[in-house]
Image (spheres, grey):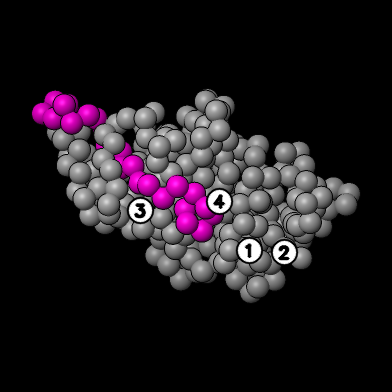
Amino acid sequence: MIQIGIGLAEPNEHLIHAVEGAAAEGTRVIVFAPRSMEPSPGITYRLSDSPESDLIDALMQGQIDGAVRGTLPANSTLRYLRDASGVDHLERIALLETVDGRKFLLTPVGIDEGSTIRSRINLVQSAKRLAEQIGMNRRVAILSGGRLGDLGRNPDVDRSLAEAELIARLTGGDHCEILIEDAVGEYGIIIAPDGISGNLIFRTLILLGSGTGHGAPVVNIDVPFVDTSRATESFGNAIRLAKNLIRRK
């Protein structure tokens, strides 16, 4: 049976319901939580003074097949994951779904990710591999800060347009300008101009636009780890995504 660990920083009924649902689907989920947590009946807990490091250590040592961050703090959890994986940065790609059912991969989504042309080119290649792995459309849309007709109005937009054109040529993607509303659905992979705008796209869709988040796999490490936002209610989606990645790995 596949075993997946998920982090729980404080009581969260959405997360507990997701764990119960996963069990009904044949997946064993272990909840990594602080010692102060009052365990819920019928759920396997692993309590410790540092659930972040305990979750990552269990993943790295093969005690669990995959992990989901759940509601653990992002900074400490991802920093420990980065150090334990031996990489100098983490690359995340979010699987999102609009309210009308259009799914797409979005990257960069971290405010410290995708700030250079090279990093976005690497993310394109990683996103193509992830799309193939989970059976999604591999067409790539490169977004920029405006339309081509806006050239000359703002130097930051001019630079964004030029970078998007270059990335599109080097990766085989299409520069879709600022028209994300046209790109989603036709393209399975959306490359934001930088991590700040990607994070804003994510938050706007999920927290204001009634969209759904399925989690954000970390794609430059060797173990299946799905990042989640503490604001999400869709932990079941992240568990299912982790299970899918484990099976296909």
Q: Which residue is drawn at 69% across and 49% down?
A: 8
Camera-side residue: 232 or 95? Answer: 95
> Nearer the N terminus, badge 2 or badge 4?
2
Total labels: the figure holds 4
Whether pointer 4 and pointer 3 mark residues with C-beta atoms closer than 8 Å, the reply is: no
Label placed on residue 2: 2
> Nearer the N terminus, badge 1 or badge 4?
4
Q: In which quarter of the image is the N terminus?
A: bottom right
For label 4, the residue is 227
- Residue 242 coordinates in the image, percent (x, y): 62, 56
Whether pointer 2 and pointer 1 mark residues with C-beta atoms closer than 8 Å, the reply is: yes
Q: How far apart are marks 1 and 4 (CA)?
A: 18 Å
For label 3, the residue is 124
Element carrying mark 3: helix
Q: Distance between the residues labelled 3 and 2?
A: 29 Å
Q: Does the magenta stretch include residue 136?
A: yes
Q: In this view, does 27 lie above or below 178?
A: below
> Nearer the N terminus, badge 4 or badge 3?
3
Q: What residue type is labelled 1?
A: Arg
The nearer-to-camera label among 1 and 4 is: 1
